[in-house]
Structures are given as structure tokens and as C-alpha cells.
Image (cartoon, rainbow, N blue to C red):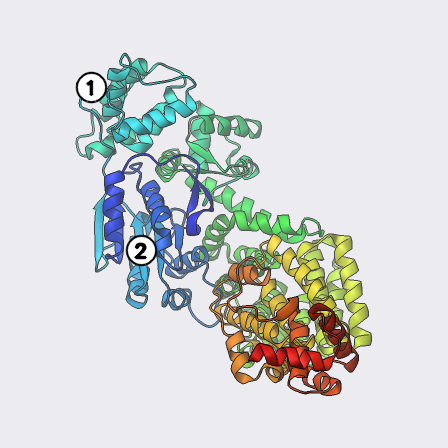
Amino acid sequence: MTERASGHGGVPRALSSFVGRKELLAELRRRIGAAPLITLTGVGGGGKTRLALELAAQVHRAYDDGVRVVELASARGGDPELLAQVVSSAVGVPDQATTTPLATLVDYLRSRQLLLVLDNCEHLVEPVAHLVHTVLGAAPGVRILATSRARLRVPGEVLVMVPPLDVPAEDAPLDLDYESVALLVDRAEASVPGWRVTPENWPDVVRVLRRVAGIPLAIEQAVVRMRSMPVSLLADRLDDVIRVLTANDTTAVEHHQTMAALIDWSHDHCTPAERLLWARLSVFEGGFSLPSAEAVCAGDGLAADDVADALAGLLDKSIALPTADRSRYHLLEPLRQHGAAQLRTAGEVDDLRMRHQEYFRREAARLAESFVGRNEAALLSAVDADMANYRVVLADLIRNPATPHVGLQMSVDLARTRWYTYAGRLPEERLWLGRALAAVPETADPLRASAIALDAWIALCLGVERELVAKRVDEADALAREVGGPLPAVTFVRGAYAVLALGAVEGVELLRQAHEEFGALGPAFAVDHHLAHILLTVSLVLLGSREQAEPAADEFFAACERLGAQWGLSWAHWCSGVVQTRWGDPERALDVLLEGLRIQRAIRDKWGPLWTIEALGWAQSRAGDGYTAARMLGLANRLHRVTGVRLDGLVPFAWVAAQAVARARAVLGDEEYARAYSNQVESVDHALAIVLDEVATPEPDRRPGGLTPAEWNVARLVGDGLSNPEVATRLVISPATVHTHLTRIYRKLDIANRHQLITLLASMAG
């Protein structure tokens, strides 16, 4: 069993020990370095996924860029574009605004040394094969480990059959070294208090293992029965079960027969409520919570009050598996497939899919309308947890000719939650909005106008070509005029375009108007009202005067503190930090910005840190620390490039950045600036670790006496013979600030004057 949480290099953390497979693991370790693609195949329940994850955990250090695991069991429909988007999301590929998801994935992997694990490919063989062939053809450092009941038929594929665990012969002496014995003993000792293998029960242990054919999942299911019966009775029951349930099946492979029989036996031992819930849970993609199970699965023979008890029964029987905190659950794929087959037999597939759609459609609308501030991080986490369910519902709604408007509304609702921005998945947001818009008639409709405005806003955030964004803004504006009423989303994007694409201060008033219009719509639009407040304040900070920016930043900070909105509060820190950078104390700005960055890391924000690290570069430049400014600006630039953001498309940001670059270059000179600016950061998490001092900086610290970077820059220029006013001019700071720095420098270096400083620096150079 594994929990869907990050472990070694992206490998989910195991909730139980890995047993056996030593020889097979050793063979796979030898082969995986040479073969570009290894596909593990074998019977369902045979341990392919667990083996793949164990192998990945063992070899992850051999790959400079680690291991990434992609679970494909829930990727319904075989949509190649969505498949590439799901893989990109799991791999951690940053946003790209102007390329297809597959092209983005390939470009990201092209220069990397990485192991990509694709789990449960059998339902998507053709699209997965195309993706794998494309990736391997362009990324020589990538190795792919796939699990599938069918081969992918990609050139270079090495097919490895994962056999059942070895089992003792009927008359074998007691021996705990058999892999199947070791697994049964490990699981039984953990779940059946006091149980041990003894010479007396050994023959019955052998009978059990031979009847389940050494299939790992079958062994796990058999151990569940040992909680309520002795192993001798279990062996007798298994003899009867396997014989009866496979007697009339002469076509299936033996191990498939055995696994199917064991799952059927588990099914037979469930209560009617548990069986019904098992079947209905198969409709979920990527897991479920108890509230979602109650909403979707209750009714028609299963009371809502009974769902929790039935789920507890499935957990006790190891049919449903929980996360460590039991907030979410999932079915192992063979068990989910069995449930899906039962759902088809009962004729409930269409009904359950409609319930599933209705629940997540309503949930998207609820989350979009539930923002009150303090629940902001929880709302974003809720969308994140169920994104696999939202994806499949969106796809079904948009494809169905009867529900395209419902799909468009859901696309807009999910966009309004801001999850795509928070998670760094803006191109996926454009993908869904684009598909939903293409599916509905081109009529004058407030929803359509708002969706186009949202699409334009996303493109604007990514710095897409100005002409393309302008065309989209004009299209939304024309629809709004045709509708004949104020549409705050359109007002907002018009203001955002004026500010961000043109650097026009006139856009500020449009943003103020949008903020008021969203506020007038009431609590259901609180999240939009809040977003408009963020951008209004950012615009004043970048384009306004100090008299405009400072009170606006203070007001926004106070509003976010009242709301308790953590994401908004990180932007309030950004605005206050930039005000201090432009007109106040840049040293104070650093403290404020770093606090905002810590908030962003705490809530796992993948978008805000791009701009906070950028602003740290601006502040360091104003503080006279050219080296750290160059490092921060270089980190931000790298993140902009790997996330597909074009800073030159965001005019006011580009203006302030250009000033910061000029200051840092003046301090360092072109050559040293280039060295400090250069870096190989590839992710927001890596950049956060560097900035927040969790990893060592690449350059040795050459500063004496514990001087700060800003003090060191002043000292170096004084050492070059510059006067205080000349130093101030070079660093774009006041002469008074130079004097303050020198006072601290003298104290730290235990010297008295400028002459002693020049002498000390000369001796260091010698």
C-alpha cells in the first residue's frame, strides 16, 4: 500500500513494507539504466505498481532530476492533449502559454536526467505509446518505467513479466524465506495480534499460499480473513472458493482466474451495503472523501447514514485504502475495476456518472462562491485534492451536446477559485476554457463574455503577445456591450490589459470600477472582489505616486489581515515591500518581502513566488547589494522562462526590473553581474529553498567581518577611492545611507576611518 504523498524524488510514500522480489529488483536495476522503456506486465493484483515504486525509490539517486510518478488509472477517455497535461502536472512541468501540452512536456524533459513512472497504462495504450515514443525520441536522459497489462509496442520497449511470488511445495519444510510466506507473515503479524507461523500451522499456510497462487493482492485479501478465522479454516474455505468460482471458466489464464475468484470471494463476504458502495465508489477518479462518497453513492438501496459504516467495512477488508489522516480514500485498481464491472451489471453506470457530475459541478460552484478569507487555503486545497474528478467531469460535460453550457459554467467556476494560478497550471485553465467556449454557440451571453474575459486574463498573466490578448479583450468587450449590462469580469480584464500590457495608468480606474462592481454582486463574488483588490493595489504600487501607492498598500494589508486571506496577505506583503523599495527603506522591504515569501511557501503557492523573488531583486538593488540583486533577478528570470511567462509582456513589471538590473550592473560590472545572475534553478520549490537559505549558495562568501552584501558594496567602492556622494550616485542611494553603512563597517571591522578601510581592503587584495 502507498499513500499519495511525495516520498523519494516524487515516489509516493509506502504505508506498508515491501517484501520479496529481491532477484527481480536486482535484474531491473541492471536493466533500467540501459533500456529507455521497461514495461512491467502481469496479472492484476500481481504487484506491478508496488514493484515499480520500490524500484523507483531504490534508484532515484541515479537520476539528477529524480523520479516522477504518474498514476493513469483514472485518466478516462484517452484524450492525448489531456493525457499530456496530466503527465505534465504530475511531473511538475511549469506552465507554457504558447505550446501544446505534449510539446511543453517534451521541451521540459529534453535536457533532463529523470525516471518517469507511468502506472496503469492498459486503458490508454495508444495515447500513452504516442507520448512515450515522442518523449524518448527527444529526451535521451529520460528513462520510462511503465506498468500495464498490455505492451505499449514502442521501439526499444523491454517487456518484463512480473510473476506471482514464489510459493512452497505442498510438502516443503517450514521456511520463511519464500517470498509469498514472507509477505503473508509480515501482513498477518501486523493485523492479527499474536499470530505466528508454527510447525503446526505451516501446512495450512502452504495450502493458503498455493490456493492464492502467490499473487500479492490475493495474499493481502486472504490475510483479512485471518482476523476472523484460523488459518486452517481459511485454507479449507479457499479450497472451496477457488474450485467453485473457477470451475466453469476454462479460458482464463490460471492466475487471472485465481485473482478474480479471490476478489469475488471478498465481494461475497461484504454486506449488501458494502457491495453497493464498492461498486458505486468506482465512479470516482483519483480518490474521494467521505462527504463526496455520501453525496454520490447514497440512495436507491443505500441510505446516506449508512455510507460511513459501509466505508468502514471496506476499510476493514482492505478494499478501500485511506490516506494517513483518513481524510481521503481510494480503491486499488483491480478492486476499482471489479467495482466498475458490478456497476455495469447493475445498470447504474449512467446514473452514477450523472450523480458524480452533479456533485462536482455543484462543488465547483460552491467553492467559487464560498470565499470569506480565512478559508482561502482550505478552498484551494479542496480543489487540488479532487482535480482528477473535476477533469473527468469537465471532459464529459463539454463532450455531451446536451450539456456544453454546464461545462462552460463549470470551467468558469473552477477558474474563479484561482486554483490554476495557485498550482501553476494556467495553460490547463486555458485548455478547458477554450474547449468549453468552442462547444457552445457564439451568441451574446454574459457567461460566454465572462469566460472570454477570463481567458484573456490568463493570457495576460503569462505575457502572451499583446495583439492576441487585445483581440480577446475586444471580443469580450463587444459581447458585454451586446448583452447590455455591466460585466465586472470584462471591466476587470480591460483594466488589467491597460495596466499590464500598456503600462497605462488609466487602467487603474477601470480596476477600481471592477472592484466596486464585484463588491455590488455580494458574497457569491467575494473571491473576484478580492482578486480585483489585489490587482488594483499592485497597479497603484507600480504606476502610481507614493501618495497613491502607500495608503493603497496599507489599506489592502489591513483588509487581508481582517479577512485572514493567506494568499492575499502574501500579495499585501509584496505591495508593501515594493512601496518600501521605491520610496522608503529597501532594507525594510527585504524583511516584508521575505515574510510574504514564507507565507507563499506555507500555502504551497506556485505563482506568487515568481514575483516576490523578482521584487527581492528590486529591493536588493535599491539597497546597494548588487550581487544578491543579480542572484534574485537571475532566479526570477529563470522561473519566468521555465513557467512560460514573458516579462516584457507585463510592462510595469518590466520597467521596474530594468531599473533594478541597471543598478546592479553599475555596482558589479557586466562580467560579475552575469556570474551572479546565472543559475540552474528549475522549480519554484528549489528557488524558495535557495532564497530562504535552505541550501547553500553557490558562491563563496568573500565579505570580511560579517559585512552585509550592501555594506560590502559600499566598502568596495570606498576602497576604489570613491567619495561618499560618488558611492551614493553609483548605488542609487542617499549620501546619508552611505554614511550609515560606513559607520557599521568601521565598527564590524574594528577600524576608525576611511584610510584604514582602504588599507585593509588593499591587503586583502594582495
For the N terminus, the quadrant is top left
- The three-letter code of the residue at mark 1 reads Pro
State the SS at label 2: strand
Query: Considering depth in this image, is 319 or 180 the residue closer to the camera?
Result: 180
Left of 570 or right of it: where is 289?
left
Seen in the picture, residue 635 relative to 715 is either above or below; the reply is above
Tag in front: 1 or 2: 1
Q: Which residue position holds label 1? A: 173
Q: Is residue 105 visible?
A: yes
Label of residue 144 in the image: 2
Q: Residues within 10 Å of mark 2 (few under 14, many from 20)?
A: many
Which percent across, then down, holds residue 558?
A: 79, 59
Q: Is residue 424 visible?
A: no
> Which quadrant of the figure has residue 477?
bottom right
Query: Considering depth in this image, is 720 or 23 the residue closer to the camera?
Result: 720
> Which quadrant of the figure has residue 66?
bottom left
Query: Considering depth in this image, is 712 or 533 the residue closer to the camera?
Result: 712
Q: Return the residue found at the far top.
A: 200
State the SS at label 1: loop
- The three-letter code of the residue at mark 2 reads Ile
Label 1–label 2 contact, CB within 8 A: no
Q: Residues within 10 Å of mark 1 (few under 14, many from 20)?
A: few
Query: Considering depth in this image, is 724 or 446 the residue closer to the camera?
Result: 724
Seen in the picture, residue 449 relative to 241 is either above or below; the reply is below
For the C terminus, the quadrant is bottom right
Identify which residue is drawn at 58% across, 66% down.
610
Identify which residue is drawn at 52% across, 47% down.
386
Which percent across, then down, holds residue 724?
A: 74, 84
Of pointers 1 and 2, the one earlier in the residue sequence: 2
Which percent across, then down, holds residue 304?
A: 56, 30
Identify which residue is drawn at 53% across, 78% down.
468
Identify which residue is drawn at 64% across, 60% down.
597
